[in-house]
Image (cartoon, rainbow, N blue to C red):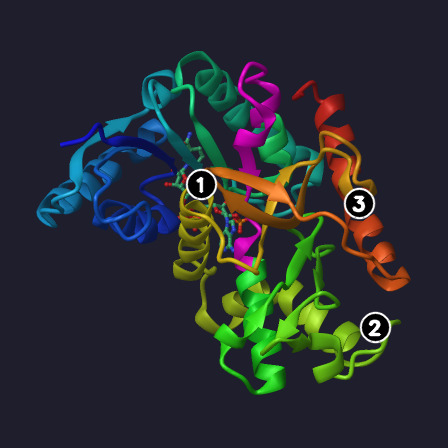
Amino acid sequence: MTTPVRITVTGAAGQIGYALLFRLASGEVLGPDVPVRLGLLEIPAATRAAEGVAMELDDCAFPLLDGVDVFDDPRAAFDGTNLALLVGARPRGPGMERGDLLAANGAIFGPQGEAIGAGAADDVRVLVVGNPANTNALITAAHAPDVPRDRFTAMTRLDHNRALTQVARRADVPVGDVRRVTIWGNHSATQYPDVFHAEIAGRPAADVLHVPEDGAGWLTDDFVPTVAKRGAAIIEVRGGSSVASAANAALDHVHDWYRGTPEGDWTSAGVVSDGSYGVPEGLVSSFPVTARDGRFEIVQGLELNAFSRARLDASVAELAAERDTAASLALL
Ligand code: NDP
């Protein structure tokens, strides 16, 4: 057997962890000939539940699963890891301010970043799912200064997938006919889902959907808020947060990172800005990205109209404010 890919999942006994671990072990994400070894990191109070998940993984007899280890210590959990999925995070409690949430999460993601920097494999890749995902990724990266910046990402793939479906519904076409949708900015209510470069069955989506340059009508009144507030809508209808779709999006992100985006299309991911599109260098912002040879690259050269520019700037301003709050709390 070839050397297994070591994957560490934090918050592994949580809902999203439960929805993604089995699919990671099945081979559908990294490939049918790629063995994996799973490390489940949990807080001490939840390691027993994680042991139960490990027992269930054993009971699936996945041929590609080399083994499962349960940890409550980040240093041990990230030792030698190739892929880190940072799912566990402190949920926003009643009356909690953004600063409180960032402080609580800094205490989680700072030490995890240090552990990744100290012991992860040279090719380590990190996906942050736990919210606020962009700034948690920034904090993680800041604590692992020797790991290349392009290895740290935040999940906006669920927003991307939601946008694809909303466009397909509006145009009454199969979702597979929609390409080149983009999520820009923060994974938050300020995110900007952009259809101005999207295509529907090869035609410009803005033409097919009669979207004017100033975004008036469906785009502003329906599409953008529907995508941005979909999580709250799921909670209202399902009676719980999105879990399977969030796990699915994390796996889509990992799949494309390792195996590439389809020719002629792109996806969206939170990556460390290199200054593209005027997003300040170092912020973890969502961009349109392609993936080749295990690397995400920001799609260059897209024209942003005034509507798109204003939306992106607003979301980036929020990211900058989160970074400043994190810095003032000495989390960076
Ligand atoms: P979930 O597995 O449902 O969610 C985990 C994280 O994913 C939350 O921060 C959640 O943010 C985030 N998330 C990102 N995108 C989405 C989305 N689209 N929909 C829903 N959630 C999204 O939470 P559980 O409470 O079931 O499990 C969390 C686990 O993490 C617990 O077992 C806990 O013990 C563990 N934990 C582990 C830590 C560690 O390993 N060191 C540290 C902290 C917690 P949001 O809630 O804002 O939506």
Dot 2: element:
loop
Dot 3: element:
helix
Identify the residue under disc 3: 277
Q: What residue type is labelled 1?
A: Val
Residue 6: x percent and y percent? 29, 30
Identify the residue under disc 2: 215
Identify the residue under disc 1: 87
Which residue occupies 76% across, 74% down?
Answer: 219
Question: Can you tell me whether the CB of the residue at mark 1 lies under 8 Å from the nearest atom of ligand 1?
Answer: yes
Q: What residue type is labelled 3?
A: Tyr
Asked whether 77 or 103 is in front, the reply is 77
Q: What stretch is highlighted in magenta?
A: 140-158
Residue 165 appears in the rendering: yes
Residue 171: x percent and y percent? 62, 85
Which residue occupies 58% across, 33% down?
Answer: 137
Q: What's the distance in space between the residues labelled 2 and 1, CA to CA? A: 34 Å
Relative to 271, 125 lies left or right: left
| Residue 286 is one of the magenta-drawn residues | no
Residue 302, quarter of the rendered image: bottom right
